[in-house]
Image (cartoon, rainbow, N blue to C red):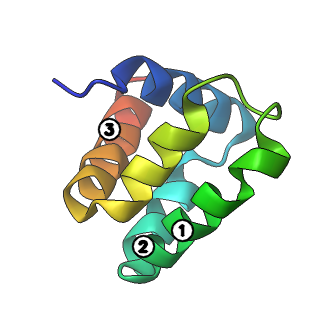
Amino acid sequence: MNSNQHIWQVWNESLHRWGLDDLVALILDATGPLNLLGAQVVYLGQPFLGKVLPEGHWDALADVLENPAKTQAFTAYLRQTDQSI
């Protein structure tokens, strides 16, 4: 089980509410290797943006971006929960 499952659920609910869940899944799939660069940007930006998201969310985002298996798992989670809503 993913240790960030509760964070993914929060993200999914927010993205679905804003109608962005399909777009985010598409972007994550399309950007592929660039996600690693995105993870580095997240790590560098944490000191400046730390209070924008709840504790642990920046680390979870960087984890999803830097690990291709987790990126695929998150996009599958977005698509799976989108169909069940």
> Is 69 rendered above or below residue 38?
above
Name the residue at 55% across, 28% down: 56
Residue reaching furthest to the left: 1
Residue found 74% across the figure and 38% down from its top = 18
Q: Do the residues labelled 2 and 1 touch (CB within 8 Å)?
A: yes
- Residue projecting furthest to the top: 6
Pinpoint residue 7: horizontal percent, then vertical percent.
48, 24
Q: Mark 1 points at which residue?
A: 40
- Name the N-terminal-most of marks 3 and 2: 2
Write the residue at 76% across / 47% down: 47
Quadrant where the N terminus sits is top left
The vertical placement of 57 against 75, above or below, is above
Query: Compared with residue 32, is residue 21 higher up or lower down, i.e. above or below?
Result: above
Q: Which amino acid does label 3 sit on?
A: Tyr
Q: Name the residue under label 3.
A: 77
Which residue lies under the disc numbered 2? 36
- Residue 11: which disc? none
Q: Measure how far apart labels 3 and 2 are at the Cα level.
A: 20 Å
Residue type pointed to by label 2: Leu
Which SS class for mark 1? helix
